Amino acid sequence: MEHYDVAIMGSGIAGLSLVNYLQELSVEKGRHISVAIIAKGRFDQTNTNWAQGGIAAVTSASDSFQSHIDDTLVAGGNSNNIKIVEQVVNSAPEVIDDLIRWGMDFDKTEKGSFDLVKEGGHQFSRIWHHKDATGAAIQSTLTEKATKLSQVAYFEYNAVTQIEREQSGVFYLKLQHIENQSLRTISADTVVLAGGGIGALYAKTTNQPICTGDSIFFAKELGASLKELCYVQFHPTGLYSDKQTTYLITEAIRGAGAILRNEKGEAFMKLYDERADLAPRDIVSRAIFSEMKKTGATNIYLDATELGEEKIKTHFPTIYSYCIDNMELDISKKWIPVVPTQHYLCGGIEVSDSGKTSIEGLYAIGECANTGLHGANRLASNSLLEAVYFAKKAASEIFNSKSPKKDSIEVEHEFTDFPITKLSREALQQKMSENAAIIKRTDNMHDMVDWITNTLSASPVLNHYTLADIETNHMYYIALWLLQDALDQKQNIGVHFNETL
């Protein structure tokens, strides 16, 4: 059986940054460390690859760390962990330096300085970006660097379907190949969950289709604590379409001057918040929901026409091309139909200031982790920053830990049988979108809990099942935990809004 010092589940910015940091420590300290990185799809099939905005980091004399800290706390409803916020914000320039050192190309002005832009919730222009495809540039940079490293095993198109931990502390991971369905087991002294969010639980999401909450499920099954799982952020401007996966219209386009309008053409955001179109995402999403509810509209509009064709093509070429190619819509001349769409999990697996869970040897970084940075609502462009920062902290702790180092494990591991039942993913997605989205109600959530519980107990066990069946079973449990957490909330804060409280 293949054994590794560290097994990483997920190949987005968190997982790949961790690989790079671990290998740098290996070279610096002159000590071998074996790493396996597991991707459910292609290595670039990640939410990171779809991130448009950028990374928030203070480097301008007109800006300040305190301002970035304040903006993060305001967006998060002051429920953030202040110490974590301070640590991450103060370390942001170092994160930028690391990315540049690894080869990341951030946009510059004609004068040669870095072109920092502004997004909703930020008082100053502090967003480092690569046009409107920052995530794709980061993904490409990190993938190119990571795949050249030695001492790293790469498992592309492999889904983790089970993780168990022996009393000895060794973890066993069952992998299923996406294409040929073959199974294999690997073991590791340390496991890092970096598998992203829970977008697949909803009918409309900006997440990759493979984001079924795997990391959340495995953490809970292993005994780790979850925290604030109901803090699910909806992005105000998902491109309106009939598909489950919704194309994201970056917040930076509103930072550049685009305006939200209702179906009557009215710019309505000043009625809801003095920051208007640049208010935090939870406020903007609820405002849009309210405007749609007034008239029964299925969407509202984002008006970017005042920006002009040249500026749009220069700063937002990906969005411009996508709308032309897929909708025959020239956004420099016509309004963009948008609707709030499930986007980001602000809560998740509870971790320490180095990404460590309550289970020895188990870490979580990236979107699946609740680090305390975001509080009840993530500030735009703080997530990529968080991922790299905690990857660096986790790498240091993992490398310096005294876990046993083995070259191989000879004993076969018998996994506990987990019954897989016949469940409808579409039914769950529709009910989650109706009962656990932007606006919630206590009675509806209780009904939803009863429906999930009864469905799980009444569904027949499958003798033969697919990876999709396994994922859907996991999703039902995650939805149940999310709803239970939402029902435990005693106040409306950030992205959590229960109109019956």
Image: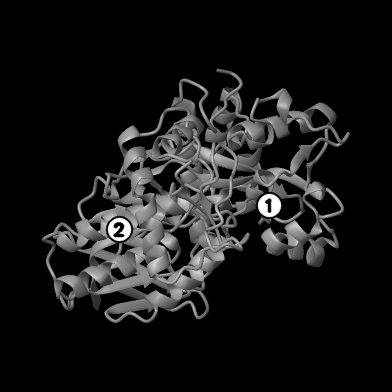
Residue at 27 percent of width and 47 percent of height: 357
Mark 1: give few (<14), some (14-19) or many (20+) Cα within 10 Å: many
Q: Nearer the viewer, residue 314 or 450?
A: 314
The disc labelled 1 sits on which kind of residue?
A: Ile
**Label of residue 195 in the image:** none
Q: Position of residue 427 (x, y in %)?
A: 64, 47
Determine if residue 314 is in view. yes
Q: Is residue 92 left or right of residue 324?
A: left
Q: Is 44 above or below relative to 230? A: below
Q: Nearer the viewer, residue 464 or 469?
A: 469
Q: Is 121 above or below relative to 13? A: above
Count of numbered tags: 2
Mark 2: give few (<14), some (14-19) or many (20+) Cα within 10 Å: many
The disc labelled 2 sits on which kind of residue?
A: Lys
Element under disc 2: helix
Residue at image mark 1: 249
Q: Is residue 41 left or right of residue 109?
A: left
Residue at 48 percent of width and 28 percent of height: 77
**Label of residue 392 in the image:** 2
Q: Is residue 165 left or right of residue 330?
A: left
- Tell me which numbered mark, 1 or 2, is placed earlier along the sequence: 1
Quadrant of the image occupied by residue 297: top right
Q: Is 265 above or below relative to 398? A: above
Quadrant of the drawing holding the N terminus: bottom left
Q: Is 271 above or below relative to 383? A: above
Q: Position of residue 311 (x, y in %)?
A: 74, 57
Q: Nearer the viewer, residue 450 or 310?
A: 310
